[in-house]
């Protein structure tokens, strides 16, 4: 039967045979409904069209206003792997001529996760799931014990890697040029985008994705694990840059982890780095995906609270020039120019600022999904609501991801040339992240009371004599660009 492939199902593991007939549909309405980053729109459309070109006569490629129109135009029965959003799932289930297959592109099956989570009786924590996945799929195991004797291995090398070669840059072709022309025309017709156009930076074919993966295994995997650092002139550090390839379905997670493990077994990468990569891919990534479906509509419905505000326009539209705080301006500029930033920037700067200002979690999820080239609803709900927004339902983490300017100063090189002082929480030179941190803790202190991992911070809060002045200062700052 012909397999309908969504734009995040483009790898060969979403087909049952190399020559299986395929249906690919471009829906213009997806981009008309919401303002996506221009480079994300380019990446998605380029990936679909490159896949259609690879498949040749085996693919029916339709460009229509909506998915419904595309299915009606094709007219025959098709099958589709379980989609990656609730909206898409509900849509395909409602179509008479569409058969929905189990999900692919993840390591643990939905049935296995549900069985495991049911046994946990409401305590389905990430660390426990990660151990379960390691054992079930025999990843980094020496017999019945984890390699090295520990499930989580501390990063042994504290030195910061310097001058790592940049990942291979994709070479644009006629398909990319066609996509850019189409997006220019759509913009002229009134379709709104955010961010800047630019040369494509991420893979859209499996060959490009495999090149990017090999580069990571050789050059960055040995240093992988220093996850909280941020440098103004190095957007990559030791991060893999593989998230778009996983989320487009170009790479399969478990084989990628197997290859990383081979690097460890061959002595080419330390266990600490390989274990961290495995934890991100078969642990954190799978966990977020499964939690999204396991809790279904109840996640993140319970995360909204009275008095939460909307994202201000300067943040939503990536107006980096209006921001004086160097770290936040740099983060917004990175997203504006490339649609990407590594997860420390997303959490400690972008998500953290939203925490402190009390912006609505669902708006933050929507913004991250639209503004980032690798943004997916299932991933952003867990990362943004559960971690950065500290609005989870007790399933993702027990610690609020809110940090002060002193943490940003300790983990980055932004603060030295900034007009704000990360040590100051009150006054004209007070860092908006430092003042915002203590104001947030004061306002959330009753809700955070009893959270073991916040005990120390709340004790420090109680010893600050000018906390009410800080709250007044930050309230006056409001949603203006800092």
Image (spheres, rainbow, N blue to C red):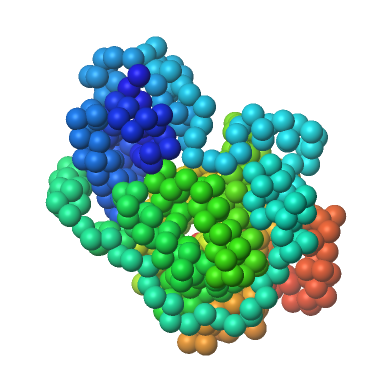
Place of residue 225 in the rendered image (x, y in percent of width and height, measured from the top left): 60, 68
Does residue 166 lie above or below 256 as drawn? below
Task: Say whether residue 163 is left or right of residue 140.
Answer: left
Place of residue 59 in the rendered image (x, y in percent of width and height, measured from the top left): 24, 30
Task: In the displayed orientation, state which residue is furthest to the top.
Answer: 96
Q: Is residue 403 visible?
A: no
In this view, the residue in front, 19 or 10, is 19
Picture residue at 14% right of the left edge, 51% below the top:
174
Place of residue 208 in the rendered image (x, y in percent of width and height, measured from the top left): 32, 55
In this view, the residue in front, 236 or 308, is 236
Picture residue at 41% right of the left edge, 65% below the top:
215
State which quarter of the image contains the N terminus.
top left
Q: Quadrant of residue 408?
A: bottom right
Q: Is residue 38 visible?
A: yes
Place of residue 279 in the rendered image (x, y in percent of width and height, measured from the top left): 63, 55
Picture residue at 61% right of the left edge, 39% below the top:
108
In this view, the residue in front, 352 or 209, is 209
Task: Say whether residue 470 is left or right of residue 87.
Answer: right
């Amino acid at each position: 039967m012909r397999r309908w492939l969504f734009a995040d199902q483009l790898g060969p593991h979403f087909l049952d045979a190399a020559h299986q007939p395929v249906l690919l549909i471009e829906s213009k309405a997806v981009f008309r409904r919401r303002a996506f980053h221009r480079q994300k729109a380019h990446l998605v459309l380029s990936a679909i069209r490159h896949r259609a070109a690879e498949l040749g006569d085996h693919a029916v490629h339709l460009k229509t206003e909506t998915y419904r129109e595309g299915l009606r135009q094709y007219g025959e029965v098709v099958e589709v792997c379980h989609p990656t959003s609730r909206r898409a799932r509900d849509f395909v289930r409602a179509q008479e001529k569409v058969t929905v297959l189990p999900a692919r592109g993840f390591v643990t099956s939905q049935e296995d996760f549900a069985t495991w989570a049911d046994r946990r009786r409401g305590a389905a924590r990430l660390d426990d799931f990660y151990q379960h996945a390691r054992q079930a799929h025999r990843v980094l195991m020496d017999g019945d014990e984890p390699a090295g004797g520990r499930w989580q291995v501390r990063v042994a090398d504290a030195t910061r890697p310097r001058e790592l070669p940049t990942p291979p840059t994709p070479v644009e072709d006629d398909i990319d040029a066609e996509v850019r022309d189409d997006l220019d025309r759509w913009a002229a017709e009134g379709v709104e985008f955010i961010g800047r156009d630019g040369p494509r930076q991420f893979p859209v074919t499996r060959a490009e994705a495999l090149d990017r993966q090999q580069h990571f295994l050789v050059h960055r995997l040995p240093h992988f694990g220093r996850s909280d650092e941020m440098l103004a002139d190095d957007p990559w550090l030791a991060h893999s840059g593989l998230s778009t390839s996983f989320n487009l379905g170009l790479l399969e997670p478990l084989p990628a982890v197997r290859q990383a493990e081979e690097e460890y077994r061959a002595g080419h990468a330390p266990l600490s780095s390989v274990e961290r990569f495995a934890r991100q891919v078969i642990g954190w990534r799978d966990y977020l995906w499964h939690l999204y479906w396991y809790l279904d509509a109840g996640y993140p419905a319970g995360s909204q609270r009275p008095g939460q505000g909307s994202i201000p326009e300067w943040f939503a539209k990536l107006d980096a020039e209006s921001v004086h705080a160097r770290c936040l301006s740099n983060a917004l500029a990175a997203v504006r120019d490339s649609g990407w930033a590594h997860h420390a920037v997303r959490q400690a700067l972008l998500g953290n600022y939203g925490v402190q200002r009390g912006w609505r979690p669902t708006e933050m999820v929507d913004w991250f999904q639209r503004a980032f080239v690798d943004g997916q609803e299932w991933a952003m709900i867990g990362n943004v609501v559960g971690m950065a927004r500290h609005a989870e339902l007790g399933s993702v983490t027990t610690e609020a991801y809110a940090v002060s300017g002193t943490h940003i100063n300790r983990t980055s090189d932004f603060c030295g040339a900034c007009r704000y002082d990360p040590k100051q929480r009150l006054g004209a030179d007070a860092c908006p992240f430092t003042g915002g941190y203590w104001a947030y803790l004061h306002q959330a202190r009753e809700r955070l009371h009893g959270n073991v991992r916040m005990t120390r911070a709340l004790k420090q809060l109680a010893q600050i004599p000018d906390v009410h002045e800080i709250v007044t200062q930050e309230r006056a700052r409001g949603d203006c660009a800092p």
